[in-house]
Image: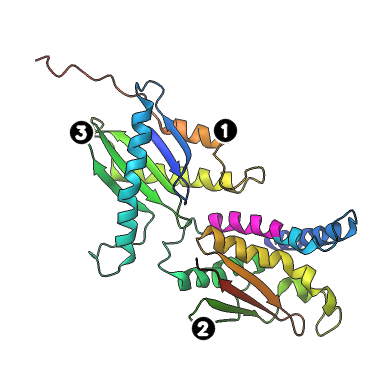
Amino acid sequence: MAVCIGVIAKENYPLYIRCAPNVENEVNFHFTVHTSLDVIEEKVASLGKSTSISTTDLREFYLGQLYPSEDYRIYGYVTNTKVKFVIVVEAANTQLRDNEVRSMFRRLHNAYTDVICNPFHVPGDKIKSKSFDSVASSMIVPERKKENPLVI
Amino acid sequence: MQEDATNVLFELLHDELISYVYSNDIDMKSKQISILESHGFRIGQSLAEQLTKDSSRFKDELEIMKFVCRDFWSAMYQKQVDNLRTNHQGVYVLQDNCFKLLKRISSGKQYLEFAPRFLAIPCGFVRGALANLGINSIVTAEVISMPAVKFQIMIQRV
């Protein structure tokens, strides 16, 4: 499960970012989510060209793993309305399957649609919905404490 | 049958919204159309989000237009647009020969002067949906003889 979930508007400003409650440096996650936007943009642009590698799911919202870093894996998802979802998973969490990530995005997308269809929500505002919050927090697990790598 | 009931409710609500905006004579004259249009815009935005949830990614502008003509129109009016034309320079014309919200009002030129108020919200729907899908546009409607309507969409490129 995720340690950080981000929702980015089509104009590339954050609508919602939530991290696991025990992370030490939350700003780092904000940074990770924002740097992933470049990769997302690149991927979406390459999807537009039909001549690129002929994978079957060129037209899917789910972009797969964006890039690996030492401690985390970052997954991306872009809707037709160009809203981006980013999920950060700990690299140590190896039992998480691609399909599970996909269904997490799916649930987030559904929850996001409900937020947009709420007449009290102003489109473009930060997401303050409690129901969205509870969906997102159900996917977040606390970060594992890093073990001291020097212990043998 | 339940489907039919919701459609009737939508029509009633739509008509009631119009008569409410027009009955309220406190300093709203000349703004009524834009009030209705902005309501439509907000609804169109939500609908675009909702209806594109399960479709695949749109490749280009024309695909978005096809989405509006097919899926969007069937969701709102239980039929598809009858004709879509474009000059390939950012102008699209959507023709509906039997527009649902005018069908019950008249067939012909009777009450033609009231047509604009019944088309403000639908114009907003289209503009809102397109805006959420990343296309800024101006949408106008033209009625020569009810219940046929031509919606003209002019894409605003920056």
Does the segment drawn in magenta span residue B47? Answer: yes
Answer whether labels 1 and 3 touch (C-beta < 8 Å): no
What kind of element bears circle 2?
loop
Host chain of mark 3: A
Q: CA distance from mark 3 to mark 2?
A: 52 Å
Give the extent of the magenta segment. B38-51
Q: Residue at x 23, y 34 (%)?
A: A94
Where residue B154 appears, as percent x and y from the top left, is: 58, 73
Report whether mark 1 lies on the same chain as mark 2: no
Question: What residue is shown with label 3?
Answer: A70
Q: Main secondary structure of the magenta part?
A: helix
Q: Name the residue: 64% across, 63% down.
A: B125
Lateral position of residue A8 relative to residue B36, left or right: left
Q: Position of residue A123 (x, y in %)?
A: 59, 48
Nearest to viewer (mark 3 / mark 2): 2
Classify 10 Å Cα crowding around label 1: few (below 14), some (14-19), many (20 and above).
few
Q: Is residue A83 magenta?
A: no
Provide the residue designation for mark 2: B87
| Residue A130's disc number | 1
